Image (cartoon, rainbow, N blue to C red):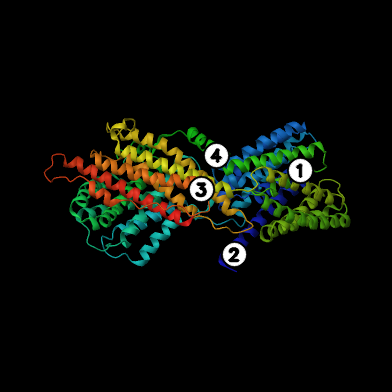
């Protein structure tokens, strides 16, 4: 067995031990120590719901913190469930609302999403007859006891190991970038390049443990996301600089100075990230010196590129120069994002035009923006929330109307067996019914054999729980359902008088819940994310095209960009407007990422070849980076022919992405047309020559720098588009 497999087994066994310990201690203390049966049931089910049914990610410390953070919401859900149980219609309406809200709350981060199934159970458990508001105190006390015991077990009993915090991954990437930047034309050692690539790869969202991923809409998490994007860009540009054609030629003095500045600034960001302390005024990494060194390289070297080189060599040198400039830009963003992470909100007024519009945003507005970003039928999170809410409400209605003896199990089956595709739901139901049947037979035999001897059940409960919570995750759904059937029988036999008839009731209720889950799966988005991923990628391609158009307009038509602050030299307002416009591509990117993540997690009957969807995400990140940076740059392209060329190039690139969007929407199978590469020779034919003694040479140099950076940005997006088209 692999090391990864051993770690997985150890994690499952550890979690089973923790849940069993918390549930049994809470149950025994309440049932036999205090003689409170309602408190005992709720203490045990709290530990089971938040420890076994929920999938809370993270280390022991993080899991314990998540459980304790969920306590206020758990108290509210138990209270609502108890009070709304007075009428079936009230309980159903409450289930509809609560089911949607809890499932949809997963948009705010992996920890809340992981806790959602357990939180659903905290409303389901008390919302059935008998209507007993007098028992609310016992129920709340049992919940608090179970939550406290589970948190203590997660923290101290075979806890999951701590993982490196995200800021430490950022610090490692910044250190690796600083080491690469110190090599000025010398061949980069293989181990150094490998370290830099590993540091960049460690920042990929798919590589970061879910509990450590900065996924919430807080300013700190958004700053970490911004810093991660900048760090990965920086490492990619430095890697390309050391491996591209002509990489080992001697660098010009201004380029060496710039690389030195990149290394110093990246090292300063790494120190701040390692320290992790809040910054006081005047403390922390600085980017001002790097930006001063960046100016001459950006402008005068741009002029040299346009004036001195032969047409056949210009693109090679242009790309090499652009790699250095883009690396410096990414370093500036890394430094500013690091400062913002540790409390410096002034980065939102950066004079270089870097877009940190969220830096001065208020927390309620940021949370509201996140919560509303998925309120669309095109969001898989919205679809799943609707599916689960409708299924649970229907199950509660059936259990209430038919007056089922243990209607709680109907909802539990609906909650645990409903999947994102009807195919997966059918497969889950088959396994669940087989497992429940086997568990019901064993439970019936146990109840008939032991009868009402509570001491026997008390001895068996820890063993049954430990086996169920170990074998279920390791052996599959059938084992989980069978094991849980035995757990339920063993636990309830200690609360009230039960007979072997409990076993077939459990099987009947699971069957009812399964049918309801299957019907909801067939009615509500039965194909899962298979079609949605194409739609979301089409929408993202259209957003990329719109972003290209907006950016090119702001770069070329400065006179029409007064609202962006360019004509009047107000980069601060440019940053705010740019950040507002970035909302469209950010939202499209979030929807596409979620649909792709769900699609990749869904089993399919046949393995159809899919386009390289991550390449579309990369193109969107490239488009967003240009829209963040280019409109805030100094300079103005006044030469009409050059501006017309840039407009045409942007229009052609945007048209390619719009055609891709239409194609993905239509789901054609014929090969798409290939977009032509960027016509850089056409630019070199129309670009304006600047005499050495020109009085406005400085402004022309700024325009040349803006032009070349825009060309490289468009060239990268065209390359992305070609790669995507080749994969379709």
Q: Which residue is mark 2?
A: 5
Q: Nearer the viewer, mark 2 or mark 4?
A: 4
Residue shown at 69% from the left, 41% from the top: 122
Q: Which residue is mark 3?
A: 664
Label 2 and label 4: CA atoms lie apart by 35 Å
Q: Earlier in the sequence, mark 2 or mark 1?
A: 2
User: Cβ–Cβ below 8 Å for labels 2 and 1?
Assistant: no
Residue shown at 31% from the left, 54% from the top: 323
Label 2 and label 1: CA atoms lie apart by 35 Å
Q: Which residue is mark 1?
A: 408
Q: Earlier in the sequence, mark 1 or mark 3?
A: 1
Query: Total number of numbered labels?
Result: 4
Q: Quadrant of the N terminus?
A: bottom right
Most foreground residue, 281 or 320: 320
Residue 435, can we see it?
A: yes
Q: Residue 464: where, in percent of width, then height?
A: 75, 57
Determine the residue located farthest toward the bottom in the rendered image: 1
């Amino acid at each position: 067995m692999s090391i990864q497999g051993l770690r997985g087994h150890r994690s499952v066994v550890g979690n089973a031990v923790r849940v069993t310990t918390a549930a049994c201690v809470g149950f025994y203390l309440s049932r036999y120590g205090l003689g409170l049966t309602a408190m005992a049931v709720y203490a045990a089910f709290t530990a089971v719901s938040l420890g076994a049914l929920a999938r809370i990610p993270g280390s022991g410390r993080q899991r314990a913190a998540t459980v304790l953070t969920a306590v206020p919401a758990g108290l509210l859900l138990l209270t609502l469930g108890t009070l709304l149980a007075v009428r079936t219609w009230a309980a159903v309406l409450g289930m509809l609302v609560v089911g949607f809200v809890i499932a949809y709350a997963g948009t705010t981060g992996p920890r809340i999403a992981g806790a959602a199934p357990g939180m659903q159970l905290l409303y389901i458990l008390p919302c059935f007859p008998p209507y007993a508001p007098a028992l609310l105190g016992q129920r709340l006390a049992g919940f608090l006891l179970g939550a406290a015991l589970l948190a203590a077990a997660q923290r101290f009993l075979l806890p999951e190991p701590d993982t490196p915090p995200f800021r430490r991954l950022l610090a490692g990437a910044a250190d690796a970038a600083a080491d690469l930047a110190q090599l000025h034309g010398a061949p980069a050692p293989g181990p150094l390049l490998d370290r830099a690539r590993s540091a960049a790869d460690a920042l990929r969202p798919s590589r970061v443990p879910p509990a450590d991923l900065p996924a919430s809409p807080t300013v700190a998490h958004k700053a970490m996301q911004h810093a991660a994007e900048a760090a990965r860009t920086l490492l990619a540009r430095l890697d390309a600089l050391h491996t591209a054609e002509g990489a080992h030629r001697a660098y010009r003095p201004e380029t060496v100075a710039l690389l030195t500045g990149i290394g110093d600034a990246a090292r300063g960001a790494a120190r701040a990230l390692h320290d992790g302390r809040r910054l006081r005024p005047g403390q922390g990494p600085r980017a001002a010196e790097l930006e001063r060194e960046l100016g001459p390289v950006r402008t005068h070297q741009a002029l040299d590129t346009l004036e001195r080189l032969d047409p056949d060599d210009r693109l090679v040198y242009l790309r090499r120069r652009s790699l250095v400039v883009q690396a410096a830009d990414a370093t500036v963003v890394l430094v500013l994002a690091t400062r913002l992470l540790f409390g410096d909100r002034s980065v939102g007024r950066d004079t270089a035009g870097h877009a940190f519009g969220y830096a001065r945003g208020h927390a309620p507005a940021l949370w509201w923006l996140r919560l509303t970003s998925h309120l669309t039928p095109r969001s898989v999170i919205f679809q799943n929330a609707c599916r689960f809410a409708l299924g649970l409400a229907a199950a509660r209605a059936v259990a209430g109307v038919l007056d089922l003896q243990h209607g709680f199990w109907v909802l539990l089956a609906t909650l645990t067996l409903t999947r994102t595709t009807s195919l997966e739901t059918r497969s889950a139901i088959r396994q669940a019914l087989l497992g429940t049947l086997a568990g019901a037979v064993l439970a019936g035999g146990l109840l008939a054999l032991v009868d009402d001897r509570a001491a026997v059940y008390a001895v068996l409960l820890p063993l049954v729980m430990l086996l169920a919570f170990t074998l279920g995750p390791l052996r599959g759904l059938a084992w989980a359902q069978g094991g849980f059937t035995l757990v339920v029988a063993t636990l309830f036999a200690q609360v009230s008088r039960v007979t072997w008839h409990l076993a077939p009731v459990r099987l009947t209720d699971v069957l009812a819940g399964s049918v309801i889950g299957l019907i909801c799966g067939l009615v509500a988005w039965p194909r899962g994310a298979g079609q949605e991923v194409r739609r979301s990628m089409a929408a993202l391609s259209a957003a990329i095209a719109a972003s290209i158009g907006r950016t090119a307009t702001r770069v070329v038509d400065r006179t029409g960009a007064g609202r962006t602050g360019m004509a009047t030299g107000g980069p601060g307002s440019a940053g705010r407007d740019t950040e507002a416009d970035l909302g469209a591509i950010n939202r499209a990117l979030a929807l596409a990422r979620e649909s792709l993540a769900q699609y990749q997690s869904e089993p399919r009957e046949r393995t159809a070849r899919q386009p390289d969807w991550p390449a579309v995400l990369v193109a969107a990140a490239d488009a967003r980076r240009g829209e963040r940076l280019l409109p805030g740059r100094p300079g103005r392209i006044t030469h009409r022919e050059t501006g017309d060329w840039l407009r045409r190039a942007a229009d052609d690139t945007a048209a390619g992405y719009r055609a891709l969007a239409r194609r993905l929407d239509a789901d054609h199978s014929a090969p798409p047309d290939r977009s032509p590469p960027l016509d850089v020779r056409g630019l070199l034919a129309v670009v304006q020559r600047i005499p050495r003694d020109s009085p406005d040479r400085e402004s022309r140099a700024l325009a040349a720098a803006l032009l070349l950076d825009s060309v490289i940005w468009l060239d990268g997006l065209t390359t992305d588009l070609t790669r995507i088209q080749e994969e379709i």
